Amino acid sequence: MKKEDFIYNDNCETPLNGSSHWESPSNIALVKYWGKSDVQIPKNTSISFTLNKCLTSTKLEFVKKTNSSELIDFDIYYDDKLKEDFKPKIQSFFDKIIKYCPYILNYKFKINTFNTFPHSSGIASSASGISALALCIMSLEQLINPKITDKYFFMKASFLARLGSGSACRSLKGRINLWGYHSSFSTSSDLYSIDFPNKVDDVFNTYHDAVLLVDKGIKTVSSTAGHNLMNNHPFADKRFQIAQENIDKLSTILKNGDTNEFVKIVENEALMLHGLMMTSNPSYILIKSKTLQIIESIREFRLKNKIPVCFTLDAGANVHVLFPDKYSDEVYDFIESKLKMYCENNSYIKDCVGFGAKQL
């Protein structure tokens, strides 16, 4: 589909008021998206696990305005508390989607949202938050035009979410998602994410992700700023080539269930992501000393116990510990005894591959 296919241009009657409520999870990229062009168009394809417990719950209440206006009227609350500092990001999102959802000008919105995990700490809170809001907007569109199909509903929701936060487009559907055009996948697109279309071994459908909260604070450099630094990065072209090659390699691994090869690809991708940050101009470092101590401990544990546990990192200091379900007892004992001491307040989240967004 082309972006023009997502422009709403029907002349249906709009409801006077109503509400929609969605939960949408975060996701963790296995092959990373880092660098973009145009409006949230990725420089390379990415593959992600959808998470289960790290999610955002968003309720959108809407009341039809009595007077027409070219201004988008909304208030945003976080856990029932008015959050004026959230408004610029949401305003930017609305500004980007108004071309595709012009009916939003007809309403005053109240947005109430809540995360089950720390905001702005490298667990992709924008991915879950923006995707949940995009789904709420699409529920409004479905009220206006009940004829839209479920396929179109989720495709446009992913398209809209991408405009607010690139990785958000991968948070709608469950288990494994692919975003960005790749010649090996005929249905892939830069405009929205798709369910990973190839066969996946059962071992990856029940993978665990223990999120070690090394630093719950706000990142010193935003993901948007980091993406922009790829524009003149000396290693950018080679990075994009490697990412596309890793998509093919990981596709084979997901099919044959080779967890040892999975470890190699996923850890390499995580370290390359942060290597790109450290070699940009200006350079910056988001990982902490405790992040490195966790990485070393995981590698020692894997070598000693022959268990295919691995780490990955998002754009922050926290560590995602990935492992097959059959080893969950041993790995969680390891986290309790050796890793949680590196976490802020000894805190971590037991998560796993999930089933995607849910309407409440």
Image: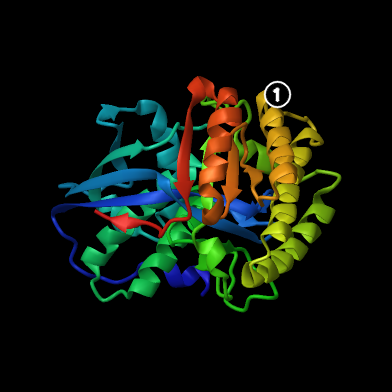
The residue positioned farthest toward the top in the image shown: 345
At x 66%, y 59%, the residue is 259
SS for dot 1: helix
Q: Nearer the viewer, residue 2 or 171?
A: 171
Q: Nearer the viewer, residue 155 or 197?
A: 197
Left/right of residue 113 with respect to residue 268 in the rendered view: left
At x 82%, y 55%, the residue is 237
Residue underneath mark 1 = 289
- Give the x, y percent position of residue 175: 48, 61
Left/right of residue 354 with respect to residue 182 in the rendered view: left
- Give the x, y percent position of residue 169: 49, 57
The residue positioned farthest toward the bottom in the image shown: 186
**Position above or below: 354 against 199:** above
- Mark 1 nearby-residue class (10 Å; few <14, some 14–19, many ≥20): few
Q: Nearer the viewer, residue 172 or 320?
A: 320
At x 26%, y 47%, the residue is 60
**Position above or below: 320 against 8:** above
**Position above or below: 68 against 193:** above
- Identity of the amino acid at label 1? Ser
Q: Is residue 282 visible?
A: yes
